[in-house]
Image: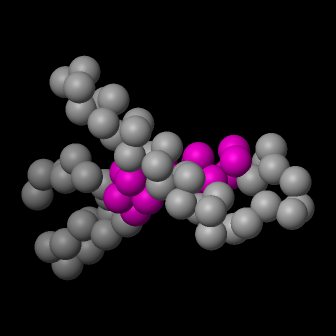
Amino acid sequence: MTTPTHCAFPVPENGETLGLTKREYFAAVALQGLVATLNRASNPEETSAEAVVFADALIGALNKTQ
């Protein structure tokens, strides 16, 4: 079984690969940074959407360098 490139931390199980996608992992890391720098009045939905934008931008930048 080969390791898929779409998983951040692939876990093989019963012929499938489980785990977070790179997009999910990058978004979680971006969200962590955004939340750490925001005040309590921030909108969680907007902050979460912004984290996904950062994740997509990082994936786009990484794809350009390959």
| Residue displayed at 53% across by 60% down | 49
Spot occupied by residue 6 in the image (x, y as percentages of width and height): 25, 52
**Residue 9 in view of the camera:** no
The answer to which of 3 and 61 lies nearer the viewer is 61
Q: Tell me, yes or no, whether the highlighted magenta stretch contains residue 9.
A: no
| Residue displayed at 22% across by 47% down | 5
Spot occupied by residue 50 in the image (x, y as percentages of width and height): 56, 53
| Residue displayed at 40% across by 39% down | 57
The answer to which of 3 and 30 lies nearer the viewer is 30
Residue 15: name its quadrant.
bottom left
Spot occupied by residue 46 in the image (x, y as percentages of width and height): 62, 62
The residue at the far right in this view is: 40
Spot occupied by residue 8 in the image (x, y as percentages of width and height): 38, 51
Dominant secondary-structure state across the stretch colored magenta: helix
The residue at the far bottom in this view is: 14
Q: What stretch of residues is rendered in magenta?
A: 20-34
The answer to which of 64 and 41 lies nearer the viewer is 41
| Residue displayed at 55% across by 52% down | 51
Q: Is residue 60 above or below residue 44?
A: above
Which quadrant: the N terminus? bottom left
**Residue 34 in view of the camera:** yes
Q: Is residue 31 above or below residue 14?
A: above
Q: Is residue 50 left or right of residue 47?
A: left
Q: Tell me, yes or no, whether the highlighted magenta stretch contains residue 27.
A: yes
Which quadrant: the C terminus? top left
The residue at the far top in this view is: 65
